[in-house]
Amino acid sequence: MGPVGTAAVRDGGAALPHGFWAAVRVWLEKPQVANRRLCGAAIEAEGTVPLGEAGEASPSLAAVWAGGSGGGQEGRAASGGAAELGRLWTEVRGQLTTGHGHLPAPLTPWGGPGRRSELRAVLRTLLPRGRPVGPPAPPTKELAVQDFYNGTVTFLPLEENSEGKYQIKKCNIYQIQLTQIKDEEWCVSIVAPFPEDWFSDGIAYPKLAWLGNELLSKLAKWSVEQKPSEFKSTLSLISVAKYSKVYQDLKEKYKEMVKVWPEVTDPEKFVYEDVAIATYLLILWEEERKEKGLTKKQSFVDLGCGNGLLVHILNNEGHSGRGIDVRRRKIWDMYGPETHLEESTIMPGDSHLFPDTDWLIGNHSDELTPWIPVIAARSSYLCCYFVLPCCFFDFHGKYSRRQSKKTQYREYLDFVAQVGFVCGFHVEEDCLRIPSTKRVCLIGKNRTYPPTECALFDKQITQYINNHQTCAGVMCDRGVGFNHKDHSDGVCKEAGSELPENETDTAGTIWMPGFQPREKVEQIRNCASLPRDFVDDVVLSVANLLLNATPQKSGSNMHGENMNTWNQGESLSLKEVAEHLNKETLKRLKSEYGGLQTLLKNNHQVFEVLNGRVHIRDWRKEKPSRKTKPEVKRRLSAEAFKTRLCWFFIHHPDGCSLPSESCPYAHGTEELRQSQIIKKKKHIQ
């Protein structure tokens, strides 16, 4: 017996043993939540298997084919799952019996007096997150055998031999156990029969120490965690195996975008986020073509497309479509003529319908988000939609909370989903794998009504939005109200039908006159657009205020050196600092988002704002980040070195606390370097 680790668990809420099996299920279906080097797991078959020497798995359970990471689409069309799982179990059980002298109980042959006659087996394939270096390795398969009677689940790694039969890789067998000590005291343990032979590949099989520490602690926590999640599991509507492959392909194909990104936004976040969203849509659309018997790839319109990268990827992957945004971006010029992007303002109304489009996309579409199901419903009966809500907008402006029992995000998602239901869609929810806190998407691809009931639902939509308009207290001319012109004559338009020729973008075709689209010129109100002289004056005033305050007591730095020779100044609260600034300055700062605090944080070379208090930054105390910086950030730091003058060298009475060679800022104009970032931007333009 090789104990890997044990964790004591106290169950005061009667969660065990059911909570333990729920935790095991998470590890079976969603191993990526613990092991970040995995993308997920594809559950290929599961069901009951007999304890006896022969027999097939129970057809009623073994034919449960489901996807990894929350029940995707893997193996839905497979047949004969019960027989295959039964044959596999017979082979595997025989191997355990043959070598049971080396296996500690209960890894020895199952069975015995008073025991149940069945076990539950799950066959899964582990999916790596990254693309392997070198030749592709065969997929990692495991047979997990759950013994509910004894509270154990045993993971049997499988290797396929040259004859196509599976053999157990005995060196990597491990078992998770639940044991009740007494009353509310339990323990969760992990054991390995051959710890000295354990082989770690660093991906599917980390080191045993990881199992005994990281995995064990998570299993113990999940076992007594009774709070249900507000959201669906990630990628619950698509195949995780397909997602893993397509994502790696697209990531490799578009990775060069990170190096030439001309926008001020973080290139790694936006590039890989759009690659992930494109991956999801490509697989979703592939499944739709199979379900509906379509041969042509779906067309789309991305409303509020922003940087246009999602449109660029989807166009490149064979889907005809375009992106529309109120403001053109610099990066649009880099895509080429094959990527179709338009600079235009979208006003929800009859002049902005898309009867020839299969899908409408709203990726962080802000004020257009609740309108997209409406536009899709009225564009054509076959038009579908995908929205990824971020900022909270109602039909007319900012969304106002109505329920305090839900989080604001959950409440807003429910609101957007309700709009879809009112518009006659079967609304599905899924959670994407993107580097964002707002990653729940809502999908409407099937209708709840036949085409003949289009006029009925059109009136229902009108009434719903008018009610929301009234509840929100929006003041507008009730004579125009929600003025959608009904062209349906009782029957929904099919894709490809044309709107009347006299439809123009007039007040009579705008569905809500009070709707406020995003401004064409983005207002910068984070103090970045304030005049440099004004900012310099505020910085100098606040710094002098701190430096001339009561001197701090003697202190030492981390090396034990006396630091009193350099004036660190005093710390003051933001309120105290504001009281010393004149009214005109405060009035000007209040017109900016964040006001005084934002201005001081923007000038991080001089100030440090912690817990509402302002300090003079002492660069001697700055510690290097423990985490390795991403390549892009390291490159930007190197390119910015000595490209700005040191404020302390010029203004502080004691000069800079660092010697010139250690300070990232220039001690005098002779040290100034030309910014490499500016050079690159000029080259791009």
Image: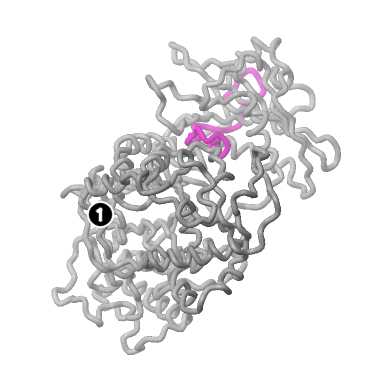
Q: Is residue 77 within the magenta segment?
A: no
578 vs 627, nearest the viewer: 578
Q: Return the x and y of residue 639 as percentages of the image width and height.
A: 36, 42
Magenta-drawn segment: 30-56
272 vs 579, nearest the viewer: 579
Residue at image position (67%, 44%) is: 556
Q: Is residue 44 within the magenta segment?
A: yes
Residue at image position (46%, 58%) is: 602
In this rendering, does residue 280 appear at all? Answer: no
Q: Return the x and y of residue 439 as percentages of the image width and height.
A: 46, 52
- Dot 1 falls on a residue whose secondary structure is loop
Q: Return the x and y of residue 190 as percentages of the image width and height.
A: 69, 27
Q: Amino acid at mark 1?
A: Lys
Q: Quadrant of residue 487?
A: bottom left
Please, is residue 65 above or below residue 386 in the view? above
Left or right: residue 94 compared with residue 4: left
